[in-house]
Image: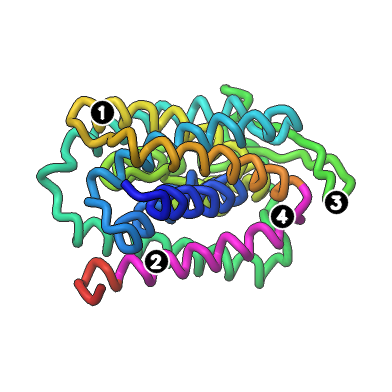
């Protein structure tokens, strides 16, 4: 394995880790296509390296978000029940699923989420719409607050439509296990649009969740021999550096700006995955 190959993997991981932590994506949805198409790594090996790197992303970025009390730990643990079950399901059935079909379905989900989030910004001018806790959130005390340093204000929010978001988290977990990604591309829009959670809190909570989700499916990848140490090592190192920078940057951005960046990335990723799914690349 040449030094150029290792350096390339390191740079790809650094950029993926930065965007993953900044947007709560985990980085795998960006990293896997780049490892496959730029470095020619087999999809299952790339997914194996990515899923380990996602654990690193979560560990670093979550520590930053938790330190600043932006992460909603109660909500994260509630949704993680569904996501972990989904991740185990997805990783267990990955051999028998058509990768092209899965990419197209996932891409359409990302594009749909990006349009929903964009229309919400156009209508409200904010990154979220304040709503009260529903009965589940009230029972579990899922509502929370955090200090937004970009706006210099304390944001207090409730959690609405908890059950639909729980179901969406299970679906995100399945996709995470199948593609070796963190599932944040689905979970962040679900928390933000469906449950009316501020964008920063949704990103921070997603970063907290993806580590547990990835760890569950990573065990299956390791057991099946899809984790190559020579590829995984530079990927994890680059991800650690990039995710720390990304988490620090997210805290300094306004929620609306963060949401607009998220929408653009989702749209680009969705288009890219459709092109790949139909065999044009």
Query: Is 249 in front, or is 147?
Result: 249
* Label 1 packing within 10 angstroms: few (<14), some (14-19), many (20+): some
Q: How many marks?
A: 4
Furthest toward the bottom, the residue is 280
Which color scheme did the rendering employ for the protein?
rainbow
Residue displayed at 41% across by 40% down:
169
Q: Nearer the observer, disc 1 or disc 3?
A: 1
Query: Is 208 in front, or is 86?
Result: 208
Earlier residue among tags 2 and 3? 3
Residue 186, compared with residue 70, is above or below; it is: below
Residue displayed at 31% across by 31% down:
217
* Residue annotated with mark 1: 222
Numbered range of the magenta stretch: 252-274
Position of residue 224 in the picture relative to residue 190 (left or right): left
Earlier residue among tags 1 and 2? 1
Assess whether mark 3 and mark 2 are in contact (beta carbons under 8 angstroms): no
* Label 4 packing within 10 angstroms: few (<14), some (14-19), many (20+): many
* Residue annotated with mark 2: 270
Position of residue 17 in the picture relative to residue 186 (left or right): right
Query: Is 73 in front, or is 58?
Result: 58
* Residue annotated with mark 3: 151
Position of residue 138 in the picture relative to residue 166 (left or right): right
Q: CA distance from mark 1 to mark 4?
A: 37 Å
* Residue annotated with mark 4: 255
Query: Is 137 in front, or is 72?
Result: 72
Residue 106, compared with residue 176, is above or below; it is: below
Q: CA distance from mark 2 to mark 3?
A: 31 Å
Residue 19 placed where, x, y %? 56, 53
Furthest toward the front, the residue is 2
Q: Residue 254 in magenta?
A: yes
């Amino acid at each position: 394995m040449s030094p150029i190959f290792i350096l390339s993997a390191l740079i790809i991981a650094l950029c993926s880790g930065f965007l993953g932590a900044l947007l709560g994506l985990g980085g795998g949805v960006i990293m896997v296509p780049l490892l496959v198409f730029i470095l020619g790594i087999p999809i299952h090996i790339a997914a194996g390296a990515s899923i380990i790197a996602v654990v690193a992303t979560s560990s670093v970025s979550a520590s930053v978000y938790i330190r600043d009390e932006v992460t909603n730990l109660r909500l994260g643990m509630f949704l993680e029940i569904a996501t972990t079950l989904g991740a185990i399901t997805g990783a267990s059935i990955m051999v028998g699923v058509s990768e092209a079909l899965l990419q197209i379905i996932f891409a359409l989900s990302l594009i749909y989420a990006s349009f929903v989030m964009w229309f919400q910004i156009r209508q409200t001018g904010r990154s979220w719409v304040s709503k009260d806790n529903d009965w589940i959130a009230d029972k579990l005390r899922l509502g929370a607050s955090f200090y937004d340093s970009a706006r210099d204000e304390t944001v207090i929010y409730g959690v609405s439509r908890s059950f639909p978001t729980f179901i969406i988290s299970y679906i995100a977990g399945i996709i995470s296990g199948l593609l070796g990604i963190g599932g944040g591309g689905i979970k962040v829009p679900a928390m933000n649009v469906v449950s009316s959670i501020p964008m920063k809190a949704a990103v921070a909570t997603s970063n907290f969740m993806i580590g547990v989700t990835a760890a569950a499916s990573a065990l299956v990848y390791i057991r099946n021999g899809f984790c190559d140490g020579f590829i995984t090592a530079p990927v994890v190192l680059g991800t650690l550096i990039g995710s720390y920078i990304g988490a620090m940057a997210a805290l300094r951005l306004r929620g609306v700006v963060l949401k607009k960046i998220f929408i653009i990335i989702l749209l680009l990723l969705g288009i890219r995955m459709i092109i790949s799914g139909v065999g044009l690349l």
